[in-house]
């Protein structure tokens, strides 16, 4: 048995059965990281010694009733606070910031027996679609090192694809789990807004951000979600939803499930090979008993502008806390307090982050607030309403994750507008607060992975994962 071939749940079982020890699994992952990281740059910070100590302690405490992911080594995106472990958000401005507490999601996984291997690379402050804006250098796609892994959780997706750990946590504000999942050929899930506490997630756009898993399959996603979901008094937007036994609901049976394909997501701009693979996925879902049909979702023209106005507005406000006083890095040679702020923020933030802060400050300024920010909020509720209507007719929706497969490194950043437009299929899911999962569903002529996206109604996370799992059972060789 090569333990690298196992899913996270299978490894958990093998650990419980005594077929592999937790230190062995951890050492194996660390060896893969040592070999692969120089190639793909997925990790910013490695916690090798800490992980080995933790692995030994967990092995000593192993009991027959241990939780399913007990002892399984994993990685966390570097915008999740980790007590005692440097957290950079892939930005110069955070310097050597080492949080005094951990994100709730990670604390809960910790109680479920997770072994943290390290912190994974990302677009600076989670702003981007390629993982090329990191202060720590771009991440490369393990499936083809000349391509981007997607973004912003590109390090998390690359780590899972390159077997540098069995699963990873990412964050998704407008697609940052699902799209890199799709580009790297792993399963990535964005839970319903509020399902997972955002406490300890460094905020990008608070009304859209969600933490979620990137895994080898949908069953692993369900197990991670079960371990970390639920109300947390430190995040007032978190809720106690129908979580905790999502895994048990994945029975592979899609009889009676109605799946809608929004016609507007299969039109102009969509690569024909991506379209063919997603339509083939629809046929496989129908093979499991689902009733699949096309329908019209006439809001797609508005989703990208609405998202970028709202996300930038929230970012400009959230990022005002990085001023060289409270956290991380401070510029040298300043004259007074204003000069300290200016120099630190000018030198500490990268170009894309500054673009978002400028755009966000503009749409919130008194002369333009009504025309942009307020209007975008109104359109957001129209978009959410269109999805609510769709879910009165369908249980799930199926769309592509992205219009194309992974672009070449170095090709996207010079045309930000084009890059923003490629987020079209993922951002409405955040605007409407819905759960979505990206499922590998084939490859293009160059062998690059393609992803299909299943979207559910709010709190429908279990159904979304059940359909993803049914599909994976159908196509598994
Ligand atoms: N690409 C989108 C953006 O740059 C989504 C990012 C995300 O989900 N964190 O805003």
Image (cartoon, rainbow, N blue to C red):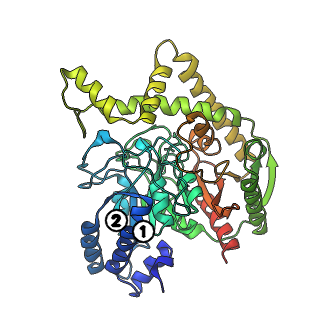
Relative side of 201 to 226, left or right:
left
**Residue 165 got which mark?**
1
Q: Answer few, some or many: residues within 10 Å of disc 2's Cα (few below 14, many 20 plus, some between 14 and 19).
A: many
- Residue at horizontal 48 percent and vertical 56 percent from the top: 140
Mark 1 touches mark 2? (CB < 8 Å): yes
Sequence-wise, the earlier of marks 1 and 2 is 2
In the picture shown, does residue 86 fall above or below 53?
Answer: above
- Residue at horizontal 72 percent and vertical 65 percent from the top: 254
Query: Residue 395 in the image: x percent, y percent?
Result: 70, 53
- Decide if ligand 1 comes within 8 Å of the CB at mark 1: no
- Looking at the image, the residue that sits furthest to the top is 367
Instruction: Tell me the SS state at disc 1.
Output: loop
- Residue at horizontal 30 percent and vertical 79 percent from the top: 59
**Residue 117 got which mark?**
2
CA separation in Å, label 1 and label 2: 7 Å
Q: What is the number of callouts on the image? A: 2
Relative side of 468 to 85, left or right:
right
Query: Residue 84 in the image: x percent, y percent?
Result: 23, 55
In the picture shown, does residue 358 fall above or below 74?
Answer: above
**Quadrant of residue 35 in the image?**
bottom left
In the picture shown, does residue 365 fall above or below 321?
Answer: above
Query: Residue 94 in the image: x percent, y percent?
Result: 29, 42
């Amino acid at each position: 048995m090569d333990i690298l071939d196992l899913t996270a749940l299978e490894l958990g079982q093998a650990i419980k059965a005594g077929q592999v020890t937790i230190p062995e699994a951890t050492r194996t992952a660390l060896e893969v990281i040592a070999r692969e990281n120089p190639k793909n740059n997925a990790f910013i910070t490695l916690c090798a010694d800490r992980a080995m100590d933790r692995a030994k302690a967990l092995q000593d405490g192993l009991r027959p009733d241990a939780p399913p992911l007990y002892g399984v080594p994993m990685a966390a995106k570097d915008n999740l606070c980790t007590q005692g472990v440097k957290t950079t958000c892939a930005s110069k401005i955070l310097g050597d910031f080492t949080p005094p507490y951990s994100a709730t999601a990670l604390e809960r996984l910790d109680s479920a027996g997770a072994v943290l291997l390290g912190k994974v690379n990302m677009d600076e402050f989670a702003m981007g679609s390629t993982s090329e804006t990191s202060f720590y250098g771009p991440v490369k796609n393990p499936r083809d090192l000349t391509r981007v892994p997607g973004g912003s959780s590109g390090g998390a997706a690359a780590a899972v694809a390159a077997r540098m750990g069995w699963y990873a946590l990412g964050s998704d504000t407008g697609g940052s789990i699902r799209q890199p999942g799709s580009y790297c050929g792993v399963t990535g899930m964005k839970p319903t807004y509020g399902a997972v506490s955002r406490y300890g997630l460094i905020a990008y756009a608070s009304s859209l951000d969600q933490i979620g898993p990137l895994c080898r399959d949908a069953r692993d996603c369900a197990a991670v979600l079960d371990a970390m979901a639920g109300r947390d008094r430190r995040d007032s937007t978190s809720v106690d939803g129908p979580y905790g036994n999502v895994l048990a609901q994945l029975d592979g049976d899609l009889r009676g499930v109605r799946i809608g394909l929004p016609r507007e997501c299969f039109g102009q701009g969509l690569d024909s090979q991506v379209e063919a693979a997603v339509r083939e996925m629809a046929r496989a879902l129908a093979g499991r008993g689902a009733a699949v049909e096309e329908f019209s979702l006439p809001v797609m023209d508005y989703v990208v502008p609405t998202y970028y106005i709202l996300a930038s507005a929230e970012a400009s406000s959230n990022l005002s806390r990085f001023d060289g006083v409270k956290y991380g890095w401070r510029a040298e040679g300043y004259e007074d307090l204003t000069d300290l702020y200016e120099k630190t923020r000018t030198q500490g933030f990268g170009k894309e982050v500054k673009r978002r802060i400028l755009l966000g400050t503009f749409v919130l300024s008194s002369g333009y607030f009504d025309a942009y920010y307020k209007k975008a909020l109104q359109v957001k509720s129209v978009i959410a309403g269109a999805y609510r209507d769709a879910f009165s007719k369908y249980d799930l929706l199926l769309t592509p994750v992205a219009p194309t497969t992974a672009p070449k490194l170095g090709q996207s950043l010079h045309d930000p507008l084009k890059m923003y437009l490629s987020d079209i299929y993922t951002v409405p899911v955040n605007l409407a607060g819905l759960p979505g999962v990206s499922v590998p569903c084939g490859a293009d002529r160059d062998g690059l992975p393609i992803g299909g996206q299943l979207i559910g109604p709010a709190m429908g996370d279990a159904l979304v994962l059940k359909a993803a799992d049914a599909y994976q059972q159908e196509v598994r060789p």
